[in-house]
Amino acid sequence: MPSKVESYRDLEVWQTAMDLTAAVYKLAESFPAHQQFGLRAQLQRAAVSIPSNIAEGHGRSITREYLHHLAIAHGSLMELETQIELSVRLGFARRAARDEVLNTAAQCGRMLHGLMKRLRELAETQSTGRSRR
């Protein structure tokens, strides 16, 4: 990641979320045609929500609002993981494909947690007017 974040595009978590979204779209291509408006669409919406909320939160000028959007992104990540597990149980996806996508999802989750932790610390510092060491 660049030393200075000038755009949400500079955030590694956003880049990883975009990779995850692309992987989910590829996974969903293998679903049966009758799932076009079912689980496939749900998976795609949940996946798109993750980088979208990271980007939207980054565009907010208030740290609390940024945290709110990151929390939504995290919720969408949990939704996505559940839907991927369901797709395997229903026979729409193979376990190997699931594992690959879930590994990227786990990485994204760790990054989201790290960013949220840092923003909470920043918000606390701003509210108390003193720096944390």
Image: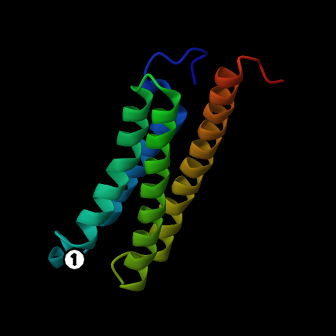
Residue type pointed to by label 1: Pro
**Nearer to the camera, 91 or 73:** 73
At horizontal 38% and vertical 75% (from top left) the residue drawn is: 93
Residue 48, x across and y down, in percent: 32, 49
Q: Quadrant of residue 47?
A: bottom left
Position of residue 44 relative to residue 8, above or below, is below
At horizontal 71% and vertical 23% (from top left) the residue drawn is: 128
Residue 103 seen by the camera: yes
Q: Quadrant of the C terminus?
A: top right
**Nearer to the camera, 108 or 22:** 108
At horizontal 50% and vertical 71% (from top left) the residue drawn is: 96
Position of residue 106 relative to residue 53, above or below, is below
Residue 99, x across and y down, in percent: 53, 67
Position of residue 111 relative to residue 106, above or below, is above
Residue 6, x across and y down, in percent: 47, 15
Q: Quadrant of residue 54?
A: top left
Residue 61, x across and y down, in percent: 44, 22
- The residue where tag 1 is placed is 32
Element at badge 1?
Answer: loop
